[in-house]
Image: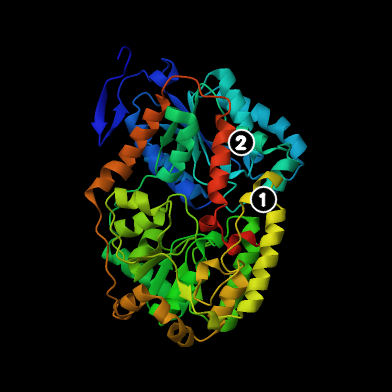
Amino acid sequence: MPGKSPVRKSGKFPVFLSRRIPGLMGSVLSRILVVHYHLRPGGVRRVIELALPAIARSAPDLREITLAVGEGSDPMWIENLRKSLGKVALRLVVEPSFRYLAEQPSPAKSLRARLAPAMESLLRATDAVWIHNPALGRNLMLADVLASTAARYGLPVIFHHHDFWFENRWARWPEMRAAGYSTLRAVAEACFPVGPGVVHATINRLDHSALRCAFGERAIWLPNPAFRAAVPSAGRVRAARTWLTRELGDSGPVWLCPTRLLRRKNLAEALLLTRWLRPEAWLVTTAAVSSEDERSYARRLMDAARKNGWRARFSILADREGDAPRVEELKAASEAVLLTSIQEGFGLPYVEAVAAGRPLLARRLPNVMPDLRRWGFRLPHTYAEVWIDPRCIDMRRERERQIVLWRRWKSSLPSSCRRLAEPPPVAAPRIEAGPIAFSRLTLAAQMEVLSLPAEETWNLCRRWNPLLRKWKPQAERASLQVAAWPAAADNELGIEAAAARFLHALDHAPGRTPPTASDLTQRTFIEQRLGREFLFPLLMDPI
């Protein structure tokens, strides 16, 4: 193909070696701008720290990466990232107008006036843009202003979608309306803009299929990078175990949830599983709350743990410095890793638990497991639901609670979406009594189950959970199975493959995208995400 850059192969994806990137209209790729709301610990920050060094190695003319965020990160993280980029310079720009809209100190009306000159200054000095999580809806003006400014400069932009506002985050709707996006179409055009330089990327195949229907070749699959890091030394693992013993007050086994303290992580279920399968173990989570919206949930969970004396320690690494171990060291010092999330875009903890060589107990999420299987992961301890005998809770009260909650939540939806919202199973008419999925309970009902003696609830529920019955003897002997790392995952998920996918995305397919693509994409997603499979009372409840 005339003008095509010579490439070398990294797995299945090309890494550009010449000075010319066709998607940049023949210009040299010397400067990249990366945009996000913040650098709090979590999936996006992990993607940034893994992918950028590989991109720096794979793009020979790259001189500078600008990381523009609404709030910074700890200086050590920034310094480590800077060192990992080698000769490529890292410029950190902290622009408060990039933060979540709900956390802005001034009214939304003045936000655009502050965003526009900041974006103008950044985009004048770059060759390509990579924005993370624009369809989360936490600051639509940021995505909107970026897209329009980039179009004026003729810049390629990768809109990388990790999460979506319409996936159990409907509290964003009134916030977006107040910011001036009064219709679903207006929101769609900000989240999924159409433009000659715009490429939309998703991190799983399910989301990619919805995007591709409208955006065609301008919709790409860009999964999160992962790799098998070097196993911490025996000395570092012993130090981490000693640190855990000191923090927890005894040397009991640890089952680790390497997550933030968020509702969608469904951490009460992790606690229930730990108490049932390994009663002497501690459930430990790593990071803190990362949003004001989650503080009430976190407080109720921690207060209940203290009041009831549960062997649980939440956010053990929050605000820690000095001798605190790294997450990788805590994994290596733990007996097992748990992932009980009811909502994940990619599920990096699945992959990283396997890479760390630790046993993993995890939920089978419908948008995550097909991709993991495609890459060859065979996880021996995954489950669809944890089933609860109705005698463990006051079912009449829970049903009434859920009906009230669902009706209030449904009334908050845009009027055109209400007919699509299905009632949760507990709120729907029931023909006969049967088990209830723990994940489909309100937090109040989950706490009701946990307040009972673990042995009592296990005896009531064991017949409904044949997989847990099978795993319990293994857990008690600390002999849960460890999944093997599949060879195919290196090509698909390795950091070099991630860099190659990113650079390849800049060489996006030519052609026009229909102006209706934004609205069509969002409507497709909404119809899917309002189905019962994706709805959870835990996420409907503002708590």
- In the picture, measured across the screen, residue 173 lies left or right of residue 312, that is right
**x, y percent for residue 469:** 35, 78
Q: Which residue is mark 1?
A: 418
- In the picture, measured across the screen, residue 430 lies left or right of residue 354, that is right
- In the picture, measured across the screen, residue 427 lies left or right of residue 59, that is right
Instruction: State the mark number for residue 188.
Output: 2
**x, y percent for residue 76:** 47, 49
Residue 466, compared with residue 52, is above or below; it is: below
Of residues 272 and 465, the one nearer the viewer is 465
Task: Tell me the mark number nearer the camera, choosing from 1 and 2.
Answer: 1
Classify mark 1: residues with Cα within 10 Å, few (<14), some (14-19) or many (20+): some
Q: Residue furthest front?
A: 431
Of residues 265 and 181, the one nearer the viewer is 181
Q: Amino acid at mark 1?
A: Arg
Residue 96, compared with residue 76, is above or below; it is: above
The N terminus is located in which quarter? top left
